Image (cartoon, rainbow, N blue to C red):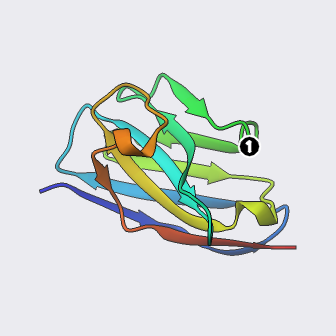
Amino acid sequence: QVQLVESGGGSVQAGGSLRLSCAVTGVSRYTMGWFRQAPGKEREFVAAISWTGINTYYADSVKGRFTISRGNAKNTVYLQMNSLKPEDTAVYYCAADRNYMATASHEYDYWGQGTQVTVSS
């Protein structure tokens, strides 16, 4: 059974940091991605990491501020978020994709339940 469980969300002031985690079971050799969805907006791509952890890709809006990584056992994916801005406020989702480094949400096969991130000014 496939399970993706996010944690680490919360409230932080602008300029602060948060680290999101995604515990993954039931899938292997998948690209992992992070997406986010703000109220009234479509879900958008944030970052992706290959199965090996060697390759990463970021949305322009988070490049240089966010870092995606995998744990040594590859069953946990992290999103380190620094220099947070109010516009980063959203529900953040992790997802698993059997294709290579996709950025479109419809390409992803499995999704977590999401974790709320709120950044105040």
Residue at screen point 32% across, 28% down: 99
> Of residues 5 and 75, which is closer to you in this image?
5
Residue at screen point 16% across, 49% down: 26
Q: Is the C terminus in the top left, top right, bottom left or bottom right quadrant?
A: bottom right
Q: Is the N terminus in the top left, top right, bottom left or bottom right quadrant?
A: bottom left
**Residue 14 horizontal/vertical position (percent):** 84, 66
**Mark 1 falls on what kind of element?**
loop
> Of residues 14 and 93, which is closer to you in this image?
93
Task: Report the side of 45 relative to 111 (left or right).
Answer: right
The image quadrant of residue 62 is top right
Figure check: 117 above or below 30: below
- Please state which amino acid type lies under the numbered disc 1: Ser
Task: Report the side of 41 relative to 73 (left or right).
Answer: right
Figure check: 75 above or below 30: below
Task: Report the side of 72 relative to 110 (left or right).
Answer: right
Figure check: 61 above or below 42: above
Badge 1 is on which residue? 61
